[in-house]
Image (cartoon, rainbow, N blue to C red):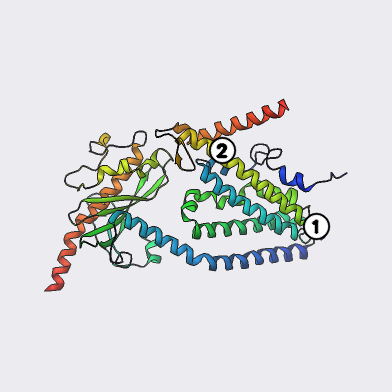
């Protein structure tokens, strides 16, 4: 054990040295890992976008834009003034903000990857990336993050479950689980997870359908 | 009289005789929480191994410098620093695993096995012994997590390290929290039974 006495000066100086040393070391490690962590985040985003759009030729991340709607019944999505990432973190609680990533494919098709979410998962937020083509049909869905029970709610990631959404539009498919009167075959034992998943998909489709006209108007406005 | 310790003993005691999970029953929160698959167990085990080793090294080096009354806060600061290092490095270089383990990585700070070894061993022994102790205990902890995770993954998901063994659903119970208690209890029971036999 220690040979130094627990005098006031010894204790204070030791703690100052230990915490100071720790802070210094952590500062270095933070600097060193800052780049890779930011890189990993971007790569994750890109992977999610690519998996719902296919190979694209533009840079969806730099062309991303946001839409938002106020919470509550009957609210519609509208375009949102661009905010940088710092501001986006402090987003208003009363608003649902979604990010659109427009991707242009090699065959001139345009797919919009939308990062949608639902807070009604079994244990918190489920984040999806939903790819929607120009006709408003789902191309593919990727679960970006979730906290559902492993082996149960986590099956929302399975292709078997996601498959039933592919090619469907908001008009020809009722995006609710069969228990709620919809057409989605939910995961047995994980109705809450399935329901939240549907909700996020519906949110993405709403956002897409409600803002696509607005965007066209803007464009024609610019032409005049 | 102080018992003489040997390198061999220090290295191997963590594996079975004083296994942190199966015998000392320390740090059970992450043990029960993350061992839903073998790979999660391995990742968590290795992260803890690193923290255990590094904190043992540093604490052993400065053990004669720290006054007795502030030793616990000093140890905790050192341990927390290494945990933060692990957290940052994993977030940067193994993002998938980092996401899987989630909150359990920062929680290594409060894993009593780390502070336990610092207080009971590293603060009283030389650098070399402390290093060996850190490795021994860390490997024992990793072994326990992989074993537990492996069994739960096989029973609950019919796969091991993500490779499917049978293409049907397993017993969900073993993936859920109760499964962790059941498997841990059975392993401890088995080990105790073996000990009696010998």
Can you give x and y, in whole percent of width and height, for residue B117 in the image?
70, 48
In depth, the one of A214 and B33 nearer the eye is B33
Can you give x and y, in whole percent of width and height, for residue A131 in the image?
27, 54
Task: Identify the residue shown where x is 74% and y is 48%.
Answer: B120
Q: What secondary structure is found at the residue carrying circle 2? A: helix
Is any atom of residue A72 visible in this view?
Answer: no
Residue under numbered circle 2: B148
Residue under numbered circle 1: A2
What is the crowding at mark 1: few (fewer than 14 residues within 10 Å), some, or many (at least 20)? some
Task: Identify the residue shown where x is 47% and y is 62%.
Answer: A37
Task: Identify the residue shown where x is 49% and y is 56%.
Answer: B94
In depth, the one of B80 and A72 nearer the eye is B80
Can you give x and y, in whole percent of width and height, for residue A145 in the image?
40, 50
Q: Is residue B127 left or right of residue B27?
A: right
Q: Is residue A29 left or right of residue A133?
A: right
Chain letter of the residue beneath label 2 in the structure image: B
Task: Identify the residue shown where x is 34% and y is 33%.
Answer: A188
Chain letter of the residue beneath label 1 in the structure image: A
Q: Which quarter of the figure is the C terminus of chain B placed in? A: top right
Specify the label residue A157 is tagged with.
none
1 and 2 marks in contact (CB < 8 Å): no
Q: How many marks?
A: 2
Can you give x and y, in whole percent of width and height, for residue A14 in the image?
73, 64
In the image as oriented, which residue stretches furthest toward the right? B1
């Amino acid at each position: 054990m220690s040979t130094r006495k627990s005098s006031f000066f010894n204790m204070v100086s030791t703690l100052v040295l230990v915490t100071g040393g720790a802070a210094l070391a952590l500062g270095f490690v933070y600097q060193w890992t800052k780049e890779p962590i930011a890189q990993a985040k971007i790569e994750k985003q890109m992977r999610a976008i690519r998996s719902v759009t296919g190979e694209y030729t533009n840079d969806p991340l730099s062309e991303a834009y946001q839409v938002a709607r106020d919470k509550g019944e009957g609210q519609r999505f509208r375009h949102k003034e661009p905010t940088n990432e710092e501001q986006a973190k402090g987003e208003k609680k009363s608003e649902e903000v979604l990010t659109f990533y427009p991707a242009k494919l090699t065959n001139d098709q345009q797919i919009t990857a939308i990062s949608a979410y639902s807070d009604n998962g079994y244990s918190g937020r489920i984040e999806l990336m939903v790819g929607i083509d120009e006709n408003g049909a789902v191309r593919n869905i990727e679960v970006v993050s979730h906290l559902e029970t492993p082996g149960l709610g986590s099956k929302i990631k399975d292709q078997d479950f996601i498959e039933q959404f592919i090619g469907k539009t908001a008009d020809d498919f009722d995006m609710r689980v069969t228990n709620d009167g919809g057409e989605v075959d939910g995961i047995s034992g994980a109705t809450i997870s399935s329901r939240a998943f549907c909700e996020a998909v519906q949110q993405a489709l709403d956002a897409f359908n409600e803002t696509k006209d607005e965007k066209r108007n803007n464009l024609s406005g610019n032409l005049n | 009289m102080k018992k003489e310790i040997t390198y061999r003993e220090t290295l191997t005691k963590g594996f079975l005789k004083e296994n942190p999970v199966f015998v000392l029953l320390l740090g059970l929160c992450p043990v029960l929480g993350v061992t839903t698959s073998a790979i999660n167990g391995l990742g968590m085990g290795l992260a803890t191994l690193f923290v255990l080793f590094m904190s043992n090294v540093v604490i052993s080096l400065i053990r004669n410098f720290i006054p007795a009354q502030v030793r616990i806060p000093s140890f905790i600061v050192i341990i927390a620093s290494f945990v933060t290092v692990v957290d940052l490095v994993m977030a940067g270089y193994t993002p998938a695993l980092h996401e899987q383990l989630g909150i359990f990585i920062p929680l290594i700070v409060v894993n009593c096995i780390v502070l336990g070894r610092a207080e009971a061993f590293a603060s009283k022994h030389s650098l070399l012994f402390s290093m060996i102790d850190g490795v021994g205990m860390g490997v024992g902890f990793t072994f326990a997590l992989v074993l537990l995770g492996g069994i739960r993954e096989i029973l609950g998901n019919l796969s091991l390290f993500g490779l499917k063994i049978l293409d049907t659903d397993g017993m969900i119970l073993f993936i859920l929290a109760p499964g962790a208690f059941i498997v841990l209890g059975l392993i401890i029971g088995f080990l105790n039974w073996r000990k009696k036999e010998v």
